Image (cartoon, helix red, strand yellow):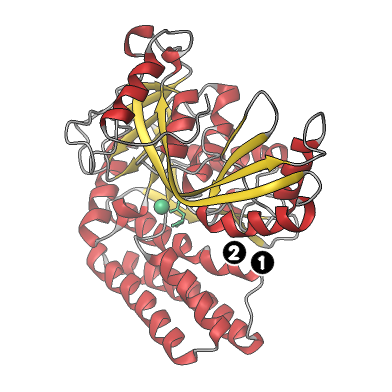
Amino acid sequence: MKLVIKFGGTSLATVKDIKNVVRIVDKISKNHETVVVCSAVDTITDELIQISSLIEKGNKKDINIMLAKISQKHKQFATHLVTNSKILKSLSNKLNSDLSELEELVHGLILLGEVTRRSYDYLISFGERLSIDLVSFSLQELKNKSVPLSGQEAGIVTDSNFGDSRPLMDTTRIRVSKIINEYFTKNTIPVIAGFSGADQNDHVTTFGRGGSDYTATIIASCIDADEIWLMSDVDGMMTADPKLVKNAKLLKEVSYTEAIEMARFGAKQIHPRTFEPLLPKNIPMRIRNSFDMNNQGTLVTLLHSKSTDSVKCVSAIRKVGLLDLTGGVLFAGPGAAAKIFSILAKNNINAMMVSSNPSESSITIVVRKEDLHKAENALEINLLGTTLKKIDTIPNVAIIAVIGSGMRGKVGIASRVFLAAQKSNSNVMMIAQ
Ligand code: ASP
Ligand code: MG
């Protein structure tokens, strides 16, 4: 079968981890046409982001220290991963070329003293550019043919919305399928840098944090993969966060719809748009642990949940705030909600949860905590005294999500949820279904 395997940064944190990843791919690629998608080596993306803020501050000394650290780490990994001198030489050349591109970019940005959205994306895409070199050449060491490809080289074309780009799927599909299938016919394992692509002007774009998941599903859709595996250091989707709930269990199967909710709310961080490319083609996904290949992980498919286990997962989002909006003279009737949400939208604030009462006198909205103040200000400037009479904010709240498609139409679940909340002495401020 055609398989896309994506490894997260935690699966690529040390030399030992990368060797493990390479062994997995080496074994699987003997029986399947395999594409590998990699995140950056653990922490590298964060370090690149730090470099970006140091550029803004003009702190050249610390920037050079950090660059040297990144360069040293990858070079050191290389010498531990590859022993064949010819392959090591090619790997060193490739790393050196990518690292000097990074250095040139950073020094250019230091001169300018600013990092635009465009150059920010270019900068933070380098973590993956470097990790794929390590993985691809290590696969060669095990006598595989393999090639490292940036998102752009793999054929991913996106819009120019830097930091949160989307693929132009028609063009991307044509390019990616041609490029990858050619490598398949040559028995070569493509190792693709997650997280980024390039717009139509060849400027590097990223999909936002955690975007390597999205890269993997984009590629899977383009080549009509039979399966996609997301590998990290957790066993799969759990019934609850195992750090909080001791008897949390692994979920063997969930539906796309449930997985989308769990990705948004759950302990397992998955890029929010990851499932989009899989839906039209119904490509099954497995979420697995690269450190425990005996475990089959969680299978995500179109599956319509059997009503036996109606609640599949309980999870929480912290760091959210609540806006309680009370209506003024112009509140009731059509248009008030539209005004409120268009102001939030104009300010790039995402309403995560909304509820309003039937008498139409108030609306309650949950937003990310860091957006709470901005939301309050924007609504105050634009609507207070007309549409709105009062704006209250509560900064310290959390959303508890109870997830499971089988809950639909079942009597008695809400009462158990509220009873549990009561038992833990928690005040329920708002509900949405
Ligand atoms: N390296 C990027 C990040 O840390 C993308 C990813 O890991 O998926 O956000
Ligand atoms: Mg990651």
Q: Which residue is mark 1?
A: 118
Q: What is the crowding at mark 1: few (fewer than 14 residues within 10 Å), some, or many (at least 20)?
A: some
- Residues at marks 2 and 1 touching, judged by CB atoms closer than 8 Å: yes
Residue 291 % position (x, y): 21, 44
Q: Amino acid at mark 1?
A: Arg
Please give left or right for residue 230 compared with residue 123 in the image: left
Residue 386 % position (x, y): 81, 47
Residue visible at 41% across and 59% down in the picture = 40
Position of 300 relative to 384 (above/below): above
Q: Which residue is mark 2?
A: 121
Q: Quadrant of residue 64?
A: bottom left
Residue 117 visible in rendering: yes
Q: Secondary structure at mark 1?
A: helix
Count of numbered circles on the image: 2
Question: Which residue is at the front of the view, 327 or 111?
Answer: 327
Distance of label 2 from label 1 (alpha carbons) = 5 Å
Please give left or right for residue 164 compared with residue 385 in the image: left
Position of 373 relative to 330 (above/below): below
Q: Amino acid at mark 2?
A: Asp
Residue visible at 39% across and 68% down in the picture = 90
